[in-house]
Structures are given as C-alpha cells and as structure tokens.
C-alpha cells in the first residue's frame, strides 16, 4: 500500500541538507551527455576491479511504521549511506542535491529509507508500473546472489507511485523486463517537506520508506554475514517554470528535454544502472543497529573481475568481427590471470546463444568461478 503525506517535515532530514535546499533557483542548462543505457561497460574498462561501496544492514530491533517518515525509534542508530555520487563517478560533477539511504532487516522484510534534498518537488505519473523515471524518482536494484541475472528493480516518485519489475538478465544481454511481476506485500510511503508541483515556493525535500518481503523475491531471510549486490539511483530532471508549473528544460540545439541526471549510491562508471557487477555490496548483520560490524571483502573480487573483463572484451570483439573470439590471444587483453580458461561452443557442440562461449578461473579462496556469453557469472 502506498501512502502519501504532503506538507510534513521528516525529522530525519539532516539540518545541513535542509539549509542547502533553501537557496538557489531552477537549474541552468546542463551540458549534453550520453543517453542512459548506451554504454554497456565502464568507460574505460579498468584492469583492476573498480571500487564499489559497501554497507552493513543491521537486524532491526522492531519493524518501522511505513509512513515515509524516518523519525521513529525503529530507525535510531541505523547508519546512513554515503551521499550519492554521479552515476559516472568522478568523471562528472558532484550531484547538486544530497541523497542518502539506510537499510535494516528482520526475519520477513528488508527495510529501506532514503532522504532526497529537493528544492522543486515534482511528480506527475500516478499509474502503477508506468515508466517512472520520466519523473524525478528514487530507485532500488537488488541482485541477491550476485550473478548479474534474475534481479529486481523498484522505483518510487514523490506521488508514491510504484514501478516494480524483474529482469532475467540485463538488457545488454537480451534481457526483457517483466512489468507484470509485482513484489507481493510491498509497502512504500513518501513524505513531502514542501508542496508538490508548485514553483511559487521553495521546497526542502522528500523521504521514502520501503518494506520488501523476502518471500516476494523467492527468498528466505539472509544469514548473518551474507552479502547481496544492491544499488540505489536517483533520477533528476532540469525544469523550467511554465504556466504555473514545471516543464522539462529543453536543449537549445536539439529542442528536446535535456538528458536527466542520474545519481547513484555506488557509481556505475557509465550512464547505465543495469550493470549489476558494479553495484554496491550490502552485508547483513544479525546484530542490532549501532553495533560495530566491519564489512568483509567481496570474495575473489580480482578473479571475478578478470572474468568480467573477458566478457567485455568478447563483446567488443564480436562488434568488430561479427563473431566471438575462440582464443584468448585473439583478444589481446593484457593482464589476464594465466589460469583463465576459455571454452567455445565449437569445442562443446551446439549451445544456446547465451552459452556460445564460457570461461572459468579458480579464485584465491579455492572456489571455481565461471562466466558465459550472456554475462552470468557464478561460483561453481
């Protein structure tokens, strides 16, 4: 159930965040940038595994009320994430407005709260499962087993409209979103610190609160120390004031709406949220909020990145040559682990397109990791 609470100030909004939101005017023209989703790998592809952010999600003392306000005792001592960055990382300027999130969990649900600084509250889309990022919104991405396939996405705007979807694999690998799928038992709510769609005043921001049942994802509650790949994103459009409302700012040359800003918790190094290998790491702790728990390094991160570099290189080779490379030497990819083994479909016989080639590598942990042409990477 979605509940909207307008014109109410969330106590949890940070004072500095609120003060910053009270100054300034509608944003000036932004430089043109690439359309979202055009790049399907970080630019440039680093030789070493890029840094991703980590967060320890504590075991909740009690489940919070889902009313959009993060000011109740259930959220006491629950840590905030770092402020979001531009989706491309340091290649772009820091976001104009601050965004932070926090997480906790119990035996049945994952709880997410976020606070978004916003001097111009805007939302127009009211129909569930519409393309919500055409409004300013807040987005959640979850890949529990970290294989980059079969993951979940949820978007919420300042009206409290929801869009939940499930993807068998990323769009770049031929995946299709299942828009008919719903998170059974999902509860979301937003709280507005200002007035929606009214450019005559200055707003302060909005907050969102989410409860996702583990059962709706086909999962049991996580174990202590278990790690999921998770990311959060915020879409922010530039607006002009027109006819007493907001209208997307148009580029002088194109006459089309300027590309939206995308701000993420853990950077993607390209304008594409659908690269789960670059999402952050959330580690579940059985201890309550406030406990001193460190996050463990991602298992065999270097070896997993070697396989991912191979995947990116294979995709580039196929774009250039119209076929997959059959030998590692064909890729001329420096710095690959010498124990990496590539197998092609011609060696194994007929295979589905997503399995036209495969590669494996043993990690320092002793585990064997595998990747295939459709990007799925898993531990054997």
Image (cartoon, grey):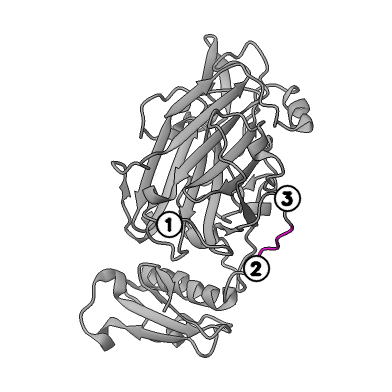
Q: Residue at x 67, y 31 (%)?
A: 71
Q: Is residue 348 left or right of residue 278?
A: left
CA gap, disc 3 to disc 1?
24 Å
**Mark with earlier residue (1, 2):** 1
Q: Residue at x 50, y 45 (%)?
A: 140
**Mark with earlier residue (3, 1):** 1
Tell me where residue 45 appears, x and y as whole percent: 56, 67
Instruction: Please tell me whether mark 1 sits on a helix, a strand or a loop.
Output: loop
Between label 1 and label 2, give the one nearer the viewer: 1
Callout 2 crowding tier (Cα within 10 Å): few <14, some 14–19, many ≥20: few
Callout 1 crowding tier (Cα within 10 Å): few <14, some 14–19, many ≥20: few
Question: Residue tagged by mark 3?
Answer: 290
Against 121, residue 48 (above or below) is below
Against 187, residue 125 (above or below) is above
Q: Residue at x 26, y 70 (%)?
A: 353
Question: Residue tagged by mark 2?
Answer: 296
Of residues 354 and 252, the one drawn nearer to the viewer in this rendering: 354
Instruction: Please tell me whether mark 3 sits on a helix, a strand or a loop.
Output: loop
Task: Tell me, yes or no, whether the highlighted magenta stretch contains residue 48.
Answer: no
Tell me where residue 51 appears, x and y as whole percent: 65, 63
Against 202, residue 52 (above or below) is below
Q: What number is the disc on residue 90? A: none
Could you tell me which quadrant the C terminus lies in? bottom left
> Furthest-left residue in view?
350
Could you tell me which quadrant the N terminus lies in? top left
CA gap, disc 2 to disc 3?
18 Å
Range of magenta residues:
292-296
Question: Residue tagged by mark 1?
Answer: 220
């Amino acid at each position: 159930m979605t509940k909207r609470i307008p014109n109410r100030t969330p106590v949890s909004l940070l004072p500095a965040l609120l003060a910053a939101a009270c100054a300034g005017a509608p944003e000036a023209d932004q430089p043109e940038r690439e359309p979202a989703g055009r790049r399907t790998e970080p630019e440039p592809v680093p030789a070493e595994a890029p840094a991703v952010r980590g967060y320890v999600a504590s075991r909740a003392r009690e489940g919070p009320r889902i009313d959009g306000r993060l000011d109740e005792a259930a959220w006491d001592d629950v840590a905030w994430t770092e402020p979001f960055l531009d989706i491309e990382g340091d290649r772009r300027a820091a976001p104009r407005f601050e965004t932070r999130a926090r997480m906790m969990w119990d035996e049945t649900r994952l709880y997410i709260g976020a606070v978004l600084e916003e001097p111009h509250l805007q939302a127009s889309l009211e129909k569930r499962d519409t393309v919500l990022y055409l409004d300013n919104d807040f987005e959640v991405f979850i890949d529990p087993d970290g294989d980059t396939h079969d993951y979940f996405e949820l978007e919420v705007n300042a009206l409290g409209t929801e869009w939940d979807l499930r993807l068998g694999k990323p769009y770049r690998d031929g995946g299709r979103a299942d828009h008919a799928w719903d998170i059974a038992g999902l509860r979301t709510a937003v709280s507005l610190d200002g007035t929606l769609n009214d450019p005559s005043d200055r707003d302060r921001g909005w907050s969102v609160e989410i409860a996702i049942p583990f059962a709706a994802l086909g999962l049991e509650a996580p174990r202590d120390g278990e790690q999921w790949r998770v990311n959060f994103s915020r879409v922010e459009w530039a607006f002009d004031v027109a006819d007493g409302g907001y209208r997307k700012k148009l580029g002088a040359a194109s006459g089309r709406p300027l590309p939206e800003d995308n701000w993420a918790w853990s950077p993607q190094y390209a304008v594409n949220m659908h690269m789960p290998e670059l999402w952050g790491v959330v580690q579940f702790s059985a201890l309550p909020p406030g406990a001193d728990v460190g996050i463990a390094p991602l298992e065999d991160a270097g070896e997993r990145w070697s396989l991912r570099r191979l995947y990116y290189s294979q995709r580039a080779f196929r774009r250039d040559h119209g076929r997959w490379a059959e030998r590692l030497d064909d890729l001329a990819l420096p710095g690959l682990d010498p124990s990496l083994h590539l197998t092609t479909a011609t060696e194994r016989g007929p295979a589905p397109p997503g399995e036209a080639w495969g590669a494996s590598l043993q990690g320092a942990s002793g585990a064997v990791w595998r990747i295939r042409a459709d990007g799925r990477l898993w531990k054997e």
